Image (tube, rainbow, N blue to C red):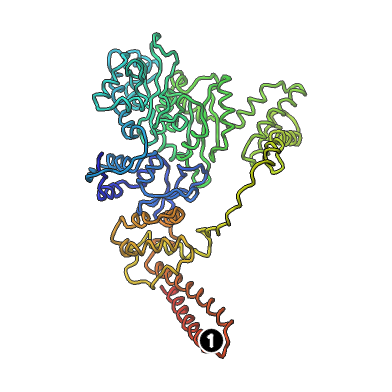
Amino acid sequence: MAGRIRDEDIATVRERARIDDVVSSYVTLRNAGGGSMKGLCPFHDEKSPSFHVTPSRGFFHCFGCQEGGDVISFLMKIDGLAFSEAVEHLADKYGVQLRREDGDDGPQRPRGPARGRLLEAHRVAQEFYADQLSRPDALAGRQFLSDRGFDQAAAEMFGVGFAPREGEALTTLLRQKGFSQEEMVASGLVAVGRSAYDRFRGRLLWPIRESNGDTVGFGARRLFDDDRVEAKYLNTSETAIYKKSQVLYGLDLARKEIARSSQAVIVEGYTDVMACHLSGVTTAVATCGTAFGDDHARVLRRFLDDRGGLRGEVIFTFDGDAAGQKAALRAFNGDQNFVSQTYVAVEPSGMDPCDLRLAKGDEAVRALVAERTPLYRFVLSNIVSRYDLDRADGRVDAMREAARLVASVRDRSKVDAFAREVAAMVGMDVDEVRAQVKRAEKWGNEKPAAGRDGRRGNERTQRDAAPAAPAAPPRAPMPALRDPRFSIERETLKLVLQHPQLVQRSLEPVTPDDFTHPAYRAVWEAVVAHGGPSAGAADPGWATGVRAALENPFVSAAFAELAVEPVRSAGEPTEAYMFAHAYRLRELTLLRRTAALKSRLQRTDPSSAEYLQLSSELWTLEQRRRELADKAVGA
């Protein structure tokens, strides 16, 4: 087994792989001030950005889910890579030659082929298929594209290719490139029957890419009548690198414009994405063989930006038929996944963007998106249109069904506005509609009867269950990191970790006792153990070493926050700003000691020698505290 990667090469990878550059392939980042950037966290579901990146220190941290680390750990978490795989991926991308030491890499977790190998197999396949599109037997594929208004340049822009009709062309190539059968099958590119054969044969192919441009799968369109697979479209089966519920076709091309304009257009097919982009709607993406769902929304939301409250837009395009209306209703049910406003764009004659572009040109596609309708109004109109509103019973039935839809809305702030909209649509009093919505809410929220302890289940089973073991005594909760009592400790450590170069002369001697929060004390002790702030000023990798020494997860999370949270100075922090916090930190320690001495003094006999000694100590502490207070002001 290959030896471990040399530490100096890992350090070089960390230095060259700018964390903001890597993270920006997965998250839209914007300047947050103080040298920090922020965006929506890719590791948990959120609507307000709490994910911070500090390029100067090479760290990220989410204040929502507490995930944090450096550029390597980010890639490990986001792509599910082992440490060495993440290092190798970054080294390859940023041109770092890795060397290994003799010996074993240590125990490896059980896993299939490495992610990097699966991605490489897809890169080879994509290049192979794209080259095949120009071959004579791909005429049907080129004709398909031409009939839909796509020329060679468009095919190259989207990486469209052709899979040869013979069954082993790609399999043979991958084998020649050194891929094992296990890797080829795990990639989803090759299947095994009596022998290994190409998964895609005689089809037009669209590479499905992650937001960073890596190809992870293919969508394949049937071209020939004798194709044994009758399905019009055949997509890559789910693999270790491809999850159809988490991938959006075209996102690699659209993500920058989505972030810039805070708009995303959801279409239904690969050719629709192509038509939109070529028409100037460069925020278009599509799902890959499945309906748009919650996971797709989470992926997309990372790239949308609400621009400080100027809500963005998510625009769905649907066919005007029953299937399109059903898709609109499904999208409405997931509307609350977005902070952005949701709209629907439906061409009156039912044409999709690809057909619309062919029939009426690029301007018509742009107009389709521009003339969008709020999604809730489209869905409500669709419901109401199914009833005869000239009849009293039709109006009542329309109101009841629309009220059930309104009652299902998770954003309660929208309910009253929707109720007024329904009242206007069906021609009924708004109070009647509100009452019907309340009834629908009640009927929809009824729960099965609960057991005596609040849980459903068989009473006898609960009675006869063995008594629970005595609970362990509760542990004292860890104080909140943002408790105002610890604000000076927090700000001082932020300065030490983010700006160690400011410490150019000896500070008032800070000790672990100056930190009353256990996590902050542990961070300071790790700082001292690694040479103190002066070592950080001289070594760019110092903070990484400090963090590596923290074994407690809570302390490690605290460190990550301190390393990325902007300091509170009005501008760039100065040496005086640093000293003021250090003096104030020491002053607070003296205040605590003074309070303790005063308490002892009150319990001591005034005529005793101990009383005189305590009084002297108290006077000394008070003098020292005043000196520090003056220094804090004058620093």
Which residue shows up at 47% across the image and 26% down it?
365
Res. 105 visible in picture? yes
Label 1 sits on residue: 611
Give the percent coordinates (x, y) of residue 508. 39, 73
Q: Nearer the viewer, residue 116 or 502?
A: 116
432 horizontally vs 3: left or right: right
Mark 1 secondary-structure assignment = helix
Give the percent coordinates (x, y) of residue 46. 51, 43
The C terminus lies in which quarter of the figure? bottom left
Give the percent coordinates (x, y) of residue 527. 37, 62
Question: Which quadrant of the structure image shows residue 199?
Answer: top left
Give the percent coordinates (x, y) of residue 471. 60, 52
Against 63, is 362 above or below?
Answer: above
Question: Which quadrant of the structure image shows residue 269?
Answer: top left
Which residue shows up at 58% across the image and 23% down it?
325
490 horizontally vs 146: left or right: right
The N terminus lies in which quarter of the figure? top left
Res. 565 visible in picture? no
Against 101, is 137 above or below?
Answer: above
Q: Nearer the viewer, residue 59 or 7?
A: 7
Question: Which quadrant of the structure image shows residue 124?
Answer: top left
